[in-house]
Image (tube, grey):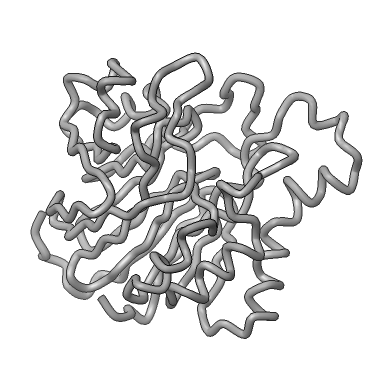
Amino acid sequence: MGTDEPDRAPAVTWWGHSTTSIELGDVTVATDPLLTDRLYHLRRHAPAPPSHAARADVVLVSHLHHDHLHVPSLDSFGGAVPVVVPRGAPDVVRSLRGRVLVEVEPGDRVAVAGLDLEVLPAHHSGRRSTFERGGSVPAIGFRFTDGRTSCWYPGDTGLTGMTDIFDALEPVDLAAVPIGGWGPSLGDEHLDPEEAVEALARVGATWALAVHYGTFWPLWLKRLRPGNHHRLFVTPAQRFQRAMVQRRLTTTALTPEFGQRIELTPAGRA
């Protein structure tokens, strides 16, 4: 892609869960697109994404779990859009075959759609489900830049074994960091709001977009005690904002409404 619009401000739109559209000049990056209203026992607790949520120049897929690698959502982007996936993904998810795939693993650095893309490890299971193969396919994260604006999307990860990785990363302009999940126990393979702030403190970012929370609610949610209900599905954004203040980070925390587009101005460092 070219750089015909050098003065165009970068922007980000959160469509719910870990799905974003990150606009860097004339390149739009989509992360882990999940554009459906229903996923097994989960229901979208948000407006349905519009059709233009499936417009991008490149799609980044962090791991094989169905809420991150959702084949029907990928179909919405068309077959010509390159999709960056963990190495070995098409051997497990055969419906990926025939697409423009860029298979990567931690430590790789590739050029795609006008971006310099660095592939990072993640502390997270890569298995698609207990009934499918895929345990050897790594979960990954990404650091990428168009030469002007830099972004970090770690995918799903916990802090365990990752602090040295976070410390070694160059600070970024935009971090899209997960702060929650959908179940009553996140375990050590996810970040809760406070752990997300710890990760941000180690990496450094001008803006931090909270993702992976509050979008898909299980059908059995009404059986949760009210306290758990609010902590898991209602208050992660507020807890994230509060933890940012308590940690005294200079990073601007972004917790937009579903589908809200935010321009990142003034443009930061690349």
In the rendered image, is residue 52 in sight?
no
In the rendered image, is residue 25 in sight?
yes
Tell me what residue is drawn at x 38 percent, y 25 percent.
Answer: 134
Residue 152 in the image: x percent, y percent?
37, 62
Tell me what residue is drawn at x 33 percent, y 20 percent.
Answer: 93
Among all residues in the image, which is located at the extreme front?
161
Quick check: 189 left or right of 168?
right
Q: Is residue 225 above or below residue 106?
A: above
Tell me what residue is drawn at x 54 percent, y 59 percent.
Answer: 159
Tell me what residue is drawn at x 82 percent, y 43 percent.
Answer: 229
Q: Quadrant of the N terminus?
A: bottom left
Q: Is residue 205 above or below residue 128?
A: below
Give the total number of marks visible in the rendering: 0
Q: Is residue 110 above or below residue 40?
A: below
Q: Quadrant of the C terminus?
A: bottom left
Residue 20 in the image: x percent, y percent?
42, 49
Quick check: 219 left or right of 210?
right
Residue 179 in the image: x percent, y percent?
60, 55
Displayed quadrant of residue 13: bottom left
Quick check: 67 left or right of 77?
right
Residue 17 in the image: x percent, y percent?
54, 43
Displayed quadrant of residue 120: bottom left
Residue 64 versus residue 43: which sits nearer the camera? 64
Residue 202 versus residue 207: which sits nearer the camera? 202
Residue 191 versus residue 74: which sits nearer the camera? 191
